[in-house]
Amino acid sequence: MKLPLALDISTLRQGYADGAFTPLDVIEAVLARCAQWPDRAVWISRVPDQDLMAQAHELMRRGAPPPDMPLWGIPFAAKDNIDCAGLPTTAACPAFSYMPRENAHAVARLIAAGALLVGKTNLDQFATGLNGTRSPYGAPRSVFDERYVSGGSSSGSAVATAAGLVSFALGTDTAGSGRVPAAFNNLVGLKPTPGFVSTQGLVPACRSLDCISVLASTVGDAKRVFETMRGFDPADDYSRPASPRNLPSEGIRFGVLGEAEREFFGDNDTAALYDAAIARLESLGGEKIEIDYAPFRETAHLLYGGPWVAERLAAVEAFAVSHAGEIDPAVRGILESAREKTAVEAFRGQYELAHLRRSAEREWAKIDIMLLPTAPTIYTVEAMRADPIVLNSNLGRYTNFVNLLDCCALAIPAGFRPDGLPGGVTLIAPAFCDDALAAWADRLHRACPTGLGIDRAAALPDSGRVAPPPSGDIEIAVVGAHLSGMPLNHQLTSTGGRLVRACRTAKDYRLFVLPDTSPAKPGMVRAPGSKGPGLSVEVWALPRAAFGDFVDAIPAPLGIGKISLEDGSSVSGFLCESHAVEGAREITHLGGWRAYMAELQTS
């Protein structure tokens, strides 16, 4: 079997299994490609050739790939703000360089799984930038046109993967640093839920928001790497135990930009790629829903325009004071602007973010996922260097909010502009929907075959398909304060609940206003033989693990029982003990709690 240009994991694993080639064959090809690749700005340091070949020999000496080594013989790279024992960590600042004594947690897991580290890749200095030009080691370029930026800050990682120098690479993603370079190089960029992958051994940019990301040729490859790295790490203060959440496997409701929020900075070709991606997801059975993007856009502004910029200074403050002249001018300007931020502004920023989260929750109640452009346009290196702050900010318009709002995201290719440059779109979902999101991202990627990285003719391997995770959700009907936009709806959304449908009960249910409740709550009882209009309810799906805690917190006289719906089906839902509604005001004739609340506002 001939080695593929993209070195995708699925094809390499099949070749190893068939005996078509060995890890040593792959490493020799990697070394030859590294020597021939014209963009020398990709690498900051490399594992010595002889050491890399010795590691490949050692894998082969052990025999066939063992089941517990899912990345056996797979070459990879790591962004040079991630510690790799034996190679310096520079964060693209030579004066900052140090030699780590051990691998970062994520790197250690990959190596234990059989992956072969090739080297450390270039980046925007201190991971501050989305374009790839802010490095003393040079500016990597898009693999499709050297005049254009590679995207950043995971610039070298994207180019190394797209050029077939490695099978995958680690990046980081605080503001879009793993997604934007994926878009500019026809790659997949997987940004996990914050805290799902340990950041122990990572030079922080914004420590409370940082994520280690994956750049790969396919969603299946990225997911395999993610599955190897993820897991709770008590050594990382920001690591979190996973609480996986599901998404609908069919009929996904996806949010899109309305006309007023569509900003492509005059790039009509990239706008057309976004429209085409929307049409493809609709053809896969998705339901397009326009959302109010304003709370997400305003959240994105907080990352650099608000007090969070001070967190970037906190990461390297002592170094920034003593080595100001060693820092890239654009990066230095951002860090110095942080000195103007006060503790009062930090709290005000937290308050504003909390408010924006509430606004975002109202939009999330309408949808399951979002489909956004990854970047609204692409710039030449020359243009970026002439206007480094404004143009870099433009690139993050649709990425900067994601970690602040605790989401996971998957950037995928969306096709090519007429000039041959690629564009991308990103699927975004609430925290810990990573596995379910990957299934939808893979389906959408396969609906638009764009090749693998620089090889536009390559086919996505069937063996890398991503299946949706099995659903373990339990449906529950809510009738009052837990409805979308109501005061207790957050008790559903915060545990991974998702709105399935709005519908009505059978006609023999009655609704009352329970006295002395805060927030105000209704009591729904069944009265066989009565003939009402049927009551408006919402059916939500809760993760099985969260259902018990949710039910346990329900106060008397409310409880959970089986509710009959107007279509003849039944679902678990809120019911009230009949004694509690004696003497209470009946509002059955209004048809639901939302109509009652609207009546109160107009009275």
Image: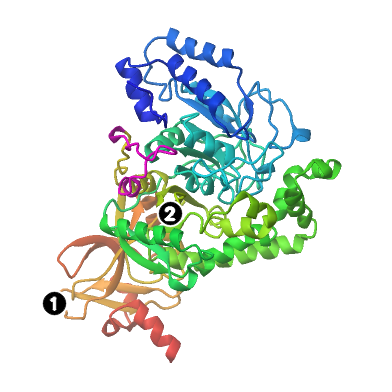
* Residue 448 sits inside the magenta stretch: yes
Residue 65 vs 281, above or below: the answer is: above
Q: Is residue 492 left or right of residue 99?
A: left
Name, please, the residue furthest toward the bottom: 603
Give the amino acid at mark 1. Answer: Gly
Looking at numbered disc 2 in the image, what kind of residue is underneath it? Arg
| Residues marked 2 and 1 touching at CB (< 8 Å) | no
How many neighbours does mark 1 have within 10 angstroms: few (below 14), some (14-19), or many (20 or more)? few
User: The residue tagged with tag 2: helix, strand or loop?
Assistant: loop
As rendered, which of 315 and 508 lies closer to the eye?
A: 315
Q: Judge by depth and name the residue closer to the eye, 414 or 398.
A: 414
**Residue at the (35%, 38%) spot, across then down:** 457
Q: Quadrant of the N terminus?
A: top left
Query: Residue visible at 41% across and 33% down?
Result: 224
Residue 430, above or below 485: above
**Which label's residue is closer to the chain start, 2 or 1?**
2
**Residue at x-position 44% and y-position 47%:** 410
Query: What numbered label is drawn on residue 597?
Result: none
Give the number of the disc on residue 417: 2
- The magenta stretch is 443-463
Picture coordinates of residue 77 (x, y %)? 54, 30
Outermost right residue: 322
Q: Is residue 469 visible?
A: yes
Mark 2 or mark 1, whichever is nearer to me: 2
Q: Position of residue 28 (x, y in %)?
A: 48, 17
Q: Is residue 109 above or below residue 518?
A: above
**Magenta part mainly helix, strand or loop?**
loop
Using the image, tell me which numbered label, if any, was put on residue 529. Answer: 1
The answer to whether 523 appears left or right of 120 in the picture is left
